[in-house]
Image: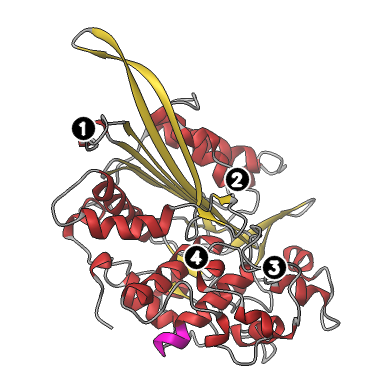
Amino acid sequence: MGLPSVYETKPEDVSSVLKLDRNALPHEPQVDKILNRYLSSLGGYLKDHAARRRVPGAAVMVRKNQEVVHMNCYGYANLATGEQVTPSTLFDLGSLSKQFTAVAALDLVVTGYLSLQDELSQFFEDFPRYADKVTVAELIHHLSAIPEYMDIYGASRTVNENWYKDAMRTSDHWYPQMAKRNRQEITNRDVMQWIASQRLLPHEPNTQFEYSNSGYVVLAEVVAKVAKARFATLVKERIFDPLEMNSSYVFDEASDFAEDAPEITNHAICYNRLRHEGFVPVGYTPLNFVYGDGNVHSNIFDLAKWDSHLHSIDFTSLCSRPGWNETASKIREFFWSPILTRGRKRIDYGAGWNLLRRKYEKTIEVNGKPVTRKYESHGEYHRGEWLGWRSYIARAARWIVPKAGGEIDPSTWDSLGIIVISNNNQFNPSRIAQEISQVFWGTLKKDNIMNSFG
């Protein structure tokens, strides 16, 4: 499969990130103040004064239009060794992984190997009859009605129903070792068998939005089956390599890293804060090898490249640029367009993104005179969470609405991208991202759509 035109990486896509000097990264003092104050508060309850300053940390990136204006790291990747978070520190992204699974599916769609209207029964003969009704598009938009595999696992007799809470209370250094504990770890194959064992769906597909990790596990299996390749390999070759996201990878049961590999040595440990114990390393569950809904591992430097590429797609699809508008519009529509259910109910969820749209009026000064202009803004965001990992990506743009039939004036376009990743389960990345957005766009919801993000 040749790389399709909508994925062609232009040099300018990630150029501002590639040009960054890792020894002199840009940073905004007000953002540093927000992060340092917040991390201090998370450790403030500890009696030991030294421990208050030694807490699991975070990495943050801010893009203003096409330029990265802030990239900095805070706190510790490993409390035991004193290793601090750096731009190379790897984190488990949790559900931020879903957008990469969606892109892998789109890769097959644009090359003609897959249709969004293909039904699951075309790929999985052992699935129940409901597979005739569930399409690829419904997996992507959480309209499949397939039950949560973690609920199926928790309800089984083979595990304590409080298995996740137990994992969050058990000190464990599974990250970054990433070694298999035994032969009982659960894989995507097991999850597919669980799902296939559910003979009926709780309701008809394409009738209501229900966030489904199961849907994205199935989607990853569709992609792997159609491409006849390991999903982790496909994502690396088709997404990470072209964007030079050289440290990013999908972790699965076939992953096998040497002890001195960057995937091990650069990986943070994640922590849960327990009463009377402080921050305790956590990391192991039997579900750690399941992917598609999660299990992309990356660092803030690679994610800045991803965000920069998304900005290029967004900007060129709305602010016409010869040769780019049509192809960029295709991928933009796939990523960030709401979808209608069978009953014509609008769902504001794209391909791994929550969506928000707004129109408003604002008085600005033109040639020394106040003039009222109509503005439009859009925003997309998603959070990720698994064990002690917390992540959040938010992006938004605003512009002056052109006259009927006119094109958006690029000089009126203003864009903001924020990524926050943490190895601290007490960390609230969406709250921090919102505070950061206010440094650049203010506190008014009219001016700053990120103030309305969930």
Give amino acid for label 1.
Ser
Q: Which quarter of the rendered picture does the C terminus lie within? A: top right
Q: State the residue lying farthest toward the front.
A: 343
**SS at mark 1 in the image:** helix
Frontmost of labels 3 and 4 is 3
Reading the image, the residue beneath label 1 is 411
Query: Picture coordinates of residue 1 (x, y %)?
Result: 28, 83
287 to 426, vertically: above or below: below
Task: Tell me, yes or no, whether the two marked residues, 2 and 1, touch with CB atoms within 8 Å.
Answer: no
Given residues 426 and 24, the one toward you in this image is 426
Frontmost of labels 3 and 1 is 3
Frontmost of labels 3 and 2 is 3
Query: Picture coordinates of residue 375 (x, y %)?
Result: 36, 28
| Side (left or right) of 152 relative to 370 | right
**Which badge, 2 or 1, comes first in the chain's sequence?**
1
| C-alpha separation, residue under disc 4 versus residue under disc 2 | 18 Å
**Which badge, 4 or 2, comes first in the chain's sequence?**
4
Q: Quadrant of residue 182?
A: bottom right
| C-alpha separation, residue under disc 3 versus residue under disc 4 | 27 Å
Query: Picture coordinates of residue 222 (x, y %)?
Result: 50, 81
Query: Any mark on residue 428, and which?
Result: 2
Q: State the residue lying farthest toward the left.
A: 322
Frontmost of labels 1 and 4 is 1
Mark 3 Cα shell of 10 Å, populated few (<14), some (14-19), many (≥20): some
Mark 2 Cα shell of 10 Å, populated few (<14), some (14-19), many (≥20): some
Give amino acid for label 4.
Ser
**Residue in the picture at 44% in, 53% down:** 337
Reading the image, the residue beneath label 3 is 204
Query: Any mark on residue 97, and which?
Result: 4
Give amino acid for label 3.
Glu
